[in-house]
Amino acid sequence: MAIAELNGKLREGGNKSAARKLRREEFLPGVLYGLKDNVILKVNQKDFGKIMDKHGHNVLIGLTLEGDSVPKRQVILKDHQSHPLRKDWLHVDFLEIDMHKKTRVSVPVKLVGHSPGEKMGGLINHATREIEVECLPGDIPNEIEINMPDVQLGDVVHIRDLKLSDKIEIIDDPNNTVVGVYVEKVKEEPAEGEEGVEGEGADAAAADKTEEKSTDNK
């Protein structure tokens, strides 16, 4: 698991206006849910963004906060808010972890390369994009990779097929589909003239019934 260093500062609680002011000053407001206490904080937006871009959301961070009673805390990203239109972070929540206790996290699934089935007209169905696992913080993978050149047309990869370290326990249902390569079924159009024949048959049947009723009334 990737480990990164991040510095920040404690801050006083405030309203939305105070949070907007922090963001204008290129700080990202956040909350740290600690092992023994919770603190509100701010970190540099650019520094935090670089860590996310380089390591992803499951990075283990050594967080040093100016004014904190703890010199450094080992944290992971617990939750976040981002701008709906721009690539901007609005708020971040950190979770302090005990490096000697297992924790549960969701790990993204990454498809690497292309399936040979794609050249044969196959379509990719990426059904599961995150998988929940449980392990020690130091063993959390940044992502789970699937080598798509090994996935042929008609193949389906289930969670049970994934090969992970013995130190990592998968929590999700092993029968869940992760990815598959399939050919889209095309609905068969009726052959030319079939609809007309059916129509003529129906008209003939209706005519026969009308004639039968006329005969019965005589």
Image (cartoon, rainbow, N blue to C red):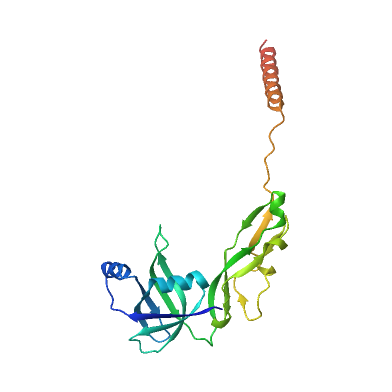
Question: Which image quarter holds the N terminus?
Answer: bottom right
Measured as percent of width and height from the top left, residue 42 is found at 35, 76
Q: How many marks?
A: 0
**Pick the front one: 217 or 198:** 198
**Pick the front one: 23 or 173:** 23
Q: Residue at x 46, y 74 (%)?
A: 77
Measured along the vertical axis of the image, is residue 201 above or below residue 177?
A: above
Measured as percent of width and height from the top left, residue 151 is found at 71, 60
Residue lying farthest to the top in this orientation:
218
Q: Residue at x 35, y 78 (%)?
A: 41
Measured as percent of width and height from the top left, residue 150 is found at 72, 63
Relative placement, left or right, of 159 versus 24 is right
Relative placement, left or right, of 4 versus 38 is right
Question: Which image quarter holds the C terminus?
Answer: top right
**Pick the front one: 170 or 40:** 40
Measured as percent of width and height from the top left, residue 43 is found at 37, 76
- The image quadrant of residue 156 is bottom right
Measured along the vertical axis of the image, is residue 175 above or below residue 1?
A: above
- The image quadrant of residue 195 is top right
Q: From this viewpoint, is residue 106 visible?
A: yes
Relative placement, left or right, of 5 versus 204 is left
- The image quadrant of residue 21 is bottom left
**Pick the front one: 53 or 71:** 53
Q: From this viewpoint, is residue 136 visible?
A: no
